[in-house]
Image (cartoon, helix red, strand yellow):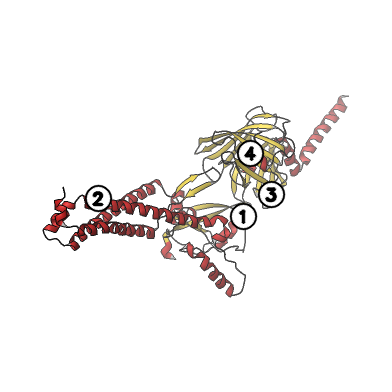
Amino acid sequence: MKKSVESGQLLVGNPRQIVTGIRLAEILDLKPGDLVMLMAQTLQGSLNLIELEFAGTKKAESSTNATHMSAHCVEMPLAAAQKLLNMPDRVSQLVVRLENPRNAPGLSGQIQKALNENGGPLFRVRDYASIIPGFGVNTLFRYIGLLVGAVFFLVIGAGIANVMYMSVMERRKEIGTMKAIGMEQREIRRLFLMEGGFLAIGGILIGLFSFLFILATNLLDGLPISFAFSETEPDQVLLSIDCGVLWASRIITFLACLAAACFPSAYSARLKPVDILREE
Amino acid sequence: MKKRLMIVIPLILFAFQATSVDLTGREIVAIVDDALDKTGGLSETEMRVYRDGKLRKTYRMVMKSCSPDRILAEFLYPPRNKGQKFLKVNDSLWLYYPNTGKTLRISAKASFSGSDFSNADILSVRLDKDYEVQRTDMEYWDGEAVYKLDLRAKSEGATYSRILYWVREKDRMPLEREFYSLSGLLLKTLVMTKETDLFEKMPDTYIMINVLEKNKKSVLQYLSYRESQALPPDTLRQNSLSKRR
């Protein structure tokens, strides 16, 4: 647990302590030992306010909503939370956070079984998809994202293929000369494949640096990006970066470039030097 | 004749004093609630929101009602909020957005359009319904006798758990309220003053001071008031918010 503490200390037996995310501590300018007033609505609907001592900050977790958690979540002893919500000796819900939320439907059954094995109170485990009716829209957006990605891939692939094809066509004379002085088909094919590979690496590097620049600019401006539809119902757009998606896009772009270079390189390698050199 | 007058006048004075002293806390709150209750009339108010000591936002709204249980507040200014309506029907509160045509149910405890007032502070006019009242000691503010009343929520669903309320004895003019949370910590202070001659004996300016955050306050001031403008019963309903009236 201590590994998850960024500064200060974790909650150590003191029922009046609180730990926050780094971003929230920055916003509130908190230092260990400061008093924090925490206001909440109780289960019955009354406003309650308690005073707690700021113990330290929690390290950001490597999850998709880490920025949101860092800016909005606090941790406190159960007794303090029960006092704040006016629910002495009562726990109504246990929330389990999964590293991969997509595993929730499968894991909820296993968790329910494990919790109810030892007797005692009966637990009912539900995932967000069953609690929030509109939660399924996330899956829909994921599929839309994949579809848009596939269209982009096709467009980019076609663009690269076109560039490579044009590049071969414009250098027919050079190819003919190379073949005339004894260059083999395999070598000419490799030459054009390497050109496609370098083009891909160059494109990936330009894309990566542009992305890092945009990210750094946004971080300086303060993430997450938030806006309000109305004053009473603020909403937030959270920017999350999936390293898996980043690597996948790089590899796919590289492979697309090589695939696009394959046809022109094979075509160029098959050309006869006599025919090419006779062309006007 | 002079002797008789000398006996009668102290008797009358004693009777008046006895009446004022004998009022229970609940009776005092009911009297003040009656005086502050502007339902049945048409009032235009201005709300100013101050942050870090500077005026940040100004709102103007008109308030209409059928009864104390059915009150409507409609924004007239600024243009961004124009047409937004807050409706109270019994214990339920609704907010209507003209741009989207959507009506949302809102909490009585939530902030009224980003100000330091809660929705209930603006739309719930009577305290005697939700609070048990106890009268504590008399206090003296600038040499004037002031009732100090201790209001405790009848149920946990009330907006505040406890309210300390100061009312001037001589004219029953409410002066100040302190709002406390369930744990007993002070949340907000409401100072009521009379800045204009709009109402004869009642305050026309309400200053809500946020105790939890420095230099935050909101001021609600009555600009005009017309009596006997009550809307017909049951006119104000959630599904009639989109209609223009």
Q: CA distance from mark 2 to mark 1?
A: 70 Å
Whether callout 4 and callout 3 share a subunit is answered yes
Disc 2 marks a residue whose amino acid type is Met
Disc 1 marks a residue whose amino acid type is Thr
Where residue A80 appears, as percent x and y from the top left, is 56, 59
Sort mark 3 into few (<14), some (14-19) or many (20+) by Cα contacts within 10 Å. some
Is residue A42 in sight in this rendering? yes
Give the side of residue B237 with respect to residue A52, left or right.
right
Circle nearer the N terminus (4, 3): 3
Point out the residue furthest to the bottom here: A118
Q: CA distance from mark 3 to mark 2?
A: 84 Å
Question: Which residue in the structure is indicated by mark 4?
Answer: B242
Asked if A269 appears above or below A115 in the picture, the reply is above
Residue A42 is tagged as 1
- Quadrant position of the C terminus of chain B in the picture: top right
CB within 8 Å, label 4 to label 3: no
Question: Which residue in the structure is indicated by mark 3?
Answer: B152
Sort mark 4 into few (<14), some (14-19) or many (20+) by Cα contacts within 10 Å. some
